[in-house]
Image: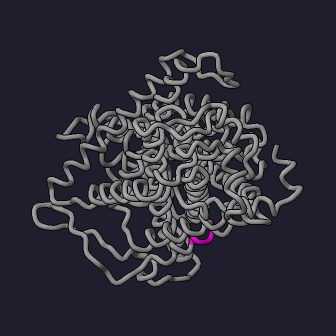
Amino acid sequence: MSDAPVARGHRLLIKKSIEQIQYESQHQHLKRTLGPVNLVFLGIGCIIGAGIYVMTGNAAANFAGPAVVLSFVVAGVACAFAGLCYAELASCMPVAGSAYTYSYTTLGEVFAWIMGWLLVLEYGVAAATVAAGWSGNVTSLLANFGLQIPVGLTTSYIQAGAGPGGATIFSGGHGLNLLGAGGILGVTALLVLGISESARVNNVIVMVKVGVLLLFIAMGIAFIHPANWHPFIPKNVGGLKYGTVGIFRAASTIFFAYVGFEAVSTAAAEAKNPSRDMPVGILGSLAVCTILYIVVAAVLTGMVPYRELGGPAPIALAVDRMGPAFAWFAILIKIGAVAGLTSVMLILTYGQSRVFFAMARDGLLPSIFSTLHRSFRTPWIGTMVLGVAIAIAAAVLPIDILGNLVSLGTAVAFAIVCISVLWLRKARPDMERPFRAPGGIWTPILGIVGAAVMAVPLIADMGLSVLKGDPIPAVILASYIVLGAVIYIIYGRANSRLAQGLGQRDADQDAGPGPMQAEVHGIGAAKADVS
């Protein structure tokens, strides 16, 4: 790796070498505490949440009917190809940053910045969306015990309403979802304390929510009415509503749920044996959750006519249909929902903070965001800043303008990861790959196709929303992209360590006792057990 400044003509497309990535993996200072079980639970903790408790019913009622089961198959297959590519890259480049780091190695710095900036948005928006659903479930659960929370503390400031011609109108309200914001701040505090502590809490939550869903399946089978599955694929009634196109539209909706397995790849720098454990965590959590989603969707649509499942709590609705004798089970379902959404907020906030950490470590963001706490060895300042930002978004923004942005960002990340695998297969065919995705070049190619299939309906929806007078989601996305471009032009280009000819080894030695170095040198002997 040369220390000479990079030629100006190639400035935006400079790339990290594989050797530098591997060096960073061996000499980074995050604490390696996660084994394969922790990583699988990490993925399950993030995947099983809003997707199963909210979006399954919405996808069935509005797009696919009972064929939502096939939608989960479509989304699962699309994710499987991308998951194999993630597993290959995570095994040979086990560093924080996920798709951001992979694109830095294969596509160049400007693409890495775009990917990292989109990932920060993706995780942040997803966490804010889940926080809104979390506050609703907490409110409902507490109501069962006679505790009423004022509506003004669980309602976002911006409200969505119907305007002339069916256009959505957004206006300021009189509430703030402080309950949802408090949930985000709670998981942020836990993440500051340490990843091992967070993982233990997540493991307990995962066991609770998976246990509740398995109990729902076991008890719900007896209340299935086969007539509710007919017609299995409802006739298309225009647009993307029902029929075969409805299956794919529903798949793009529930694609939101699968952001969790991508979050596992952000934990590579804190895995004990990343080359072996990352593929297990990524593919294991994806397989478990896809099977669970399919079975739950089948039972749910068999218990309740699909047109009635569009509410915010479809599983609780199904339990209510079981009769008053099962009122206790309805409370248990709500506990499972609260637990499920809590772990999703935890892992999404974790993933976002690690991407931010990687970007700051590379000099593309201020180095204060890569500062490690002396005792906890976590990027505590960046985690707190992002946690507060997500909390504000959860308090102010409604779910209506957030959902599709997450799925779209996920599809872009999947495509870039698959492209990265293709590039490395050609550029570095002899590179050691502890895990190699089977299927040759067809696996990443099919992963790109799958990401496109998920993204096209979302882009079409966003375009239709603009035409109908609802430009808010498009405006948020465009504004965020412009902000990112300004930050990169003003700060990132001038401070990029790679552009200055500094490898990570050189950067650590030459930067002096900056925020990250000062904290790391204060760790002392603790550094030894990292490598």
| Percent coordinates x, y for residue 25 in the rendering | 71, 41
Q: Is residue 171 visible?
A: yes
Q: Which residues are magenta?
A: 183-187
Q: Is residue 191 left or right of residue 229?
A: right
**Residue at (58, 37) in percent of width and height:** 286
Q: Which quadrant of the view contains residue 2? A: top right
Q: Is residue 229 left or right of residue 183?
A: left
Give the dominant element type of the magenta stretch: helix, strand or loop: helix
Q: Nearer the viewer, residue 200 or 226?
A: 200
Please determine whether, in this image, residue 89 is positioned above or below residue 437.
below
**Residue at (82, 60) in percent of width and height:** 523
Q: Is residue 194 left or right of residue 465?
A: right
Please determine whether, in this image, residue 319 is positioned above or below residue 388.
above
> Residue at the right extreme?
525
| Percent coordinates x, y for residue 389 in the rendering | 49, 69
**Quadrant of the image containing the N terminus:** top right
Q: Is residue 72 visible?
A: no
**Quadrant of the image containing the C terminus:** top right
**Residue at (33, 56) in percent of width and height:** 482
| Percent coordinates x, y for residue 406 in the rendering | 42, 51
Q: Is-magenta flag for residue 184?
A: yes
| Percent coordinates x, y for residue 418 in the rendering | 48, 29
> Residue at the front extreme?
4
